[in-house]
Amino acid sequence: MAHQMRTFENGTALAAGLADAVASALATAIARGGEATLAVSGGSTPKAFFEALSTRRLDWTKVKVTLVDERFVPEDNPRSNHLLVKTHLLKNEAAAAEFVPLYRPEATIEDAAKTASGIVPGMSRPFEVAILGMGTDGHTASFFPGGDHLAAALDLTLPRRVMTMEAPGAGEARLTLTFSALHDAGLLVVHIEGAEKKAVLEKALAGTDEQDMPIRAVLERAQTTPDIYWAP
């Protein structure tokens, strides 16, 4: 499986290195085309990275930020990825960025997915930057083992969009960008930390079953060679 492994001494160094790489990619995109798009993931792992990225100087007014995936919960819910990004990224220099959430207060999650698909950046062209995480079950984005729409989410022949996902390990119902919307990002990063996540990554690299460990789809079939950022 093709990938670039980037190892850092600790989480602080990783956060700074990843923030520098992302800021550079966004600045290059702005200089080239006048705007840039960034898709980020939730969870506890990216907090330090968000804090570091928020201080990087670039023309954030020309950056649109969205989420790779989201729980179907309002912004003020403690488990909302929107709240996480608002708290840790959309401040300092990055307060000037435009944030486009996946959650929409629609009657159903299917309606929310349809609405988000029409307005989220990256549906018509590749993201400049997409940052993925990985769970200990081998999921990434909301591509969960046993997910009710997992096969469709991983199908690169289907249109770029936001879709729904429910799975035993997901907790709340989820909204997620499809793999087709992520696989060709200009900079595609898998951000993991700790020995446990490294062991999961090694297991994924050793196998082939994407339904069992969906992160394998990213490692095997992404058009952009993913950079794996890891620190103990």
Image: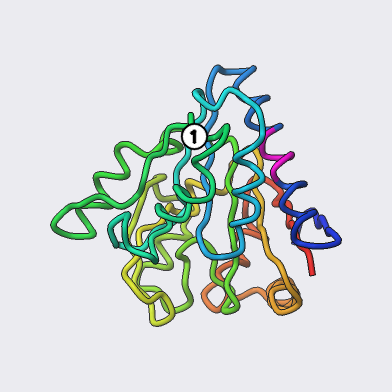
Residue at the (32%, 63%) spot, across then down: 77
Label 1 amino acid?
A: Ala
Percent x, y of residue 75 = 32, 54
Q: Is residue 141 within the magenta segment?
A: no
Q: Which residues are magenta?
A: 19-23
> Is 225 situated above or below 149?
above
Residue 22 sits inside the magenta stretch: yes
Q: Tell me residue 226's x, y (percent).
A: 70, 52
Is residue 224 left or right of 151 when viewed as pictured? right
The residue lying at 51 percent from left, 23 percent from top is: 62
* Quarter residue 192 falls in: bottom right
- Is 113 left or right of 217, judged from the image as shown? left
Q: Is residue 72 left or right of residue 2?
A: left
Picture coordinates of residue 165, whole percent (x, y): 35, 66
Q: Residue furthest left?
A: 107
Q: Main secondary structure of the magenta part?
A: helix
Percent of width and height locating residue 172: 33, 72
221, 32: nearer the viewer: 32
Residue of label 1: 95
User: Horizontal placement of 37 versus 74: left or right?
Assistant: right
Q: Quadrant of the image for the C terminus?
A: bottom right
Q: Nearer the viewer, residue 51 or 184?
A: 51
Quadrant of image for the N terminus: bottom right
